[in-house]
Image (tube, rainbow, N blue to C red):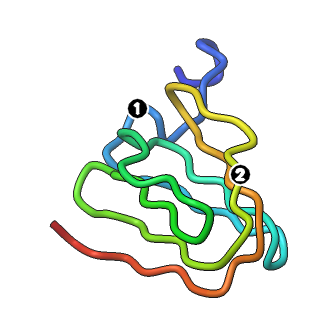
Amino acid sequence: MADELEIPNNALSDNFDLKMHGTKKVIIENHLGVTIYEDNIVTVKTNDSKITIKGSKFKIEEINNYNVIVKGNIKEIIFDKE
């Protein structure tokens, strides 16, 4: 069904999907929004957790209903269950 609607498969579930491209880029699919956006920290809310990305020189390359793409120097990613 997701293929027919041309949306990511996990957009129809409660799970998020996180992909890293080295230490410079993070893609989070199936998010509920960005709650903190600063030069050295970005926090993204998901259905049952909060993802905190720490580092420096962060920029949000893309954000839409399905994914958020954060670029910068990534040093740490923290997952907090809510």
Crowd class of label 2 (few under 14; some 14 to 19; many from 20; radius 10 Å): some
Between the residue at mark 2 and the residue at mark 1, the CA separation in whole angstroms equals 27 Å
Disc 2 target residue = 59
Q: Where residue 22 sits: x, y (%)?
A: 84, 77
Name which residue lies at 36% across and 49% down.
35
**Rendering coords of residue 75 (x, y %):** 66, 86
Residue visible at 76% across and 58% down in the picture: 71
Q: Quadrant of residue 82?
A: bottom left
Q: Which residue is mark 1?
A: 12
Residue at point 59% right, 13% down?
A: 5
Q: Amino acid at mark 1?
A: Leu
Q: Which mark is residue 64?
A: none
| Rendered residue at 55%/24% (across/down) | 2
Q: Nearer the viewer, residue 70 or 6?
A: 70
From the viewer's side, name the closer residue of 67 and 13. Answer: 67
- In the picture, measured across the screen, residue 3 lies left or right of residue 32, that is right
Question: SS for tag 2?
Answer: strand
For marks 2 and 1, the one nearer the N-term is: 1
Q: For the residue marked with disc 2, what is the amino acid?
A: Lys
Q: Secondary structure at mark 1?
A: helix
Farthest bottom residue in view: 75
**Residue 81 relative to residue 76: left or right:** left
Residue 56 horizontal/vertical position (percent): 69, 74
Left or right: where does residue 82 sit relative to residue 40?
left
Q: In the image shown, does 39 or 9 lie closer to the viewer?
A: 39
- Can you say whether 59 is above or below 81 in the image? above
Query: Whole-percent x and y of residue 64?
Result: 57, 27
Q: Is residue 20 left or right of residue 82?
A: right
**Vertical placement of 48 versus 24: above or below?**
above
- The answer to which image quadrant residue 13 occupies is top left
